[in-house]
Image (tube, rainbow, N blue to C red):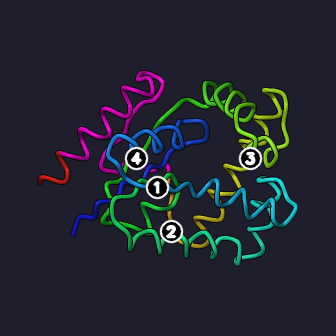
Amino acid sequence: MKKEIITICGGLGSGKSSTAKKVAQTLGYKHFSSGDFFREVGLKLGLSVNEVNIRAETDPRIDEMTDQKLRDMGKENKVVIDSRTAYHWIPESFKVYLDLPTEIAKGRILNSVKADKLREQSEQVSTSEEVFQKMHERFQSEQKRYWDLYKINNTDKNQFDLVVDTNKNNLEQVVAIVVSEYKKWREK
């Protein structure tokens, strides 16, 4: 049974959070960011987001907290979730993948880090090269954990109901595409 939940996945810097916030606002839904939740866990532990990822490789409690939160979100209605694994935990959601080349993502992440105090505190980076390095490290850590824990590859676009290129579409266009396709999906 289809749920009134949209899960948005994608590579680093692809616009998951920005898209999810605007889609939620457009539809009058709630918004939840597992990345923000993960960052808050890190700050409570006194760790950067990369350090939390590294620790999570050997301490399953960190992922278990996030995973349980996502499963709990799956019991709600009218919510948009940006997360790399929510599509897995909430298979009856409308699953969106935002695609973006890595080189473009690098610049976007740096701009987003500078504009967001929580990210700035948790990322602990200042140059594009540092951003790219941390981005790559985090991506590798996450991919390893997701495969080891769940045997999922969240970059396999065949698992999603919709794939949107966020390089060819600006934020407003991406939001319009997601909302339009979600409405069609709900009607099927």
Amino acid type at circle 1 is Ile
Q: Whole-percent x and y of residue 58?
A: 78, 73
Q: Whole-percent x and y of residue 100?
A: 52, 32
Task: Please tell me whether mark 4 sits on a helix, a strand or a loop.
Answer: helix
Residue ID for mark 2: 70
Find the distance from the CA under tag 1 to the CA under tag 3: 18 Å
Q: Whole-percent x and y of residue 104?
A: 60, 24
Residue projecting furthest to the left: 188
Find the distance from the CA under tag 4 to the CA under tag 3: 21 Å
Badge 4 local density, few (<14 within 10 Å), some, or many (20+)?
many
Badge 2 local density, few (<14 within 10 Å), some, or many (20+)?
many
Which dot, 1 or 3, sits closer to the camera?
3
The image quadrant of residue 78 is bottom left
Which dot, 2 or 4, sits closer to the camera?
4
Find the distance from the CA under tag 4 to the CA under tag 1: 9 Å
State which region is magenta. 155-183
The image quadrant of residue 117 is top right
Q: Which residue is depicted at the point 38% across and 47% down?
A: 96
Badge 3 local density, few (<14 within 10 Å), some, or many (20+)?
some
Whether the residues at callouts 2 and 3 have beta carbons within 8 Å, the answer is no
**Above or below for 102 versus 124:** above
Sequence order check: which comes first, mark 1 or mark 2? 2
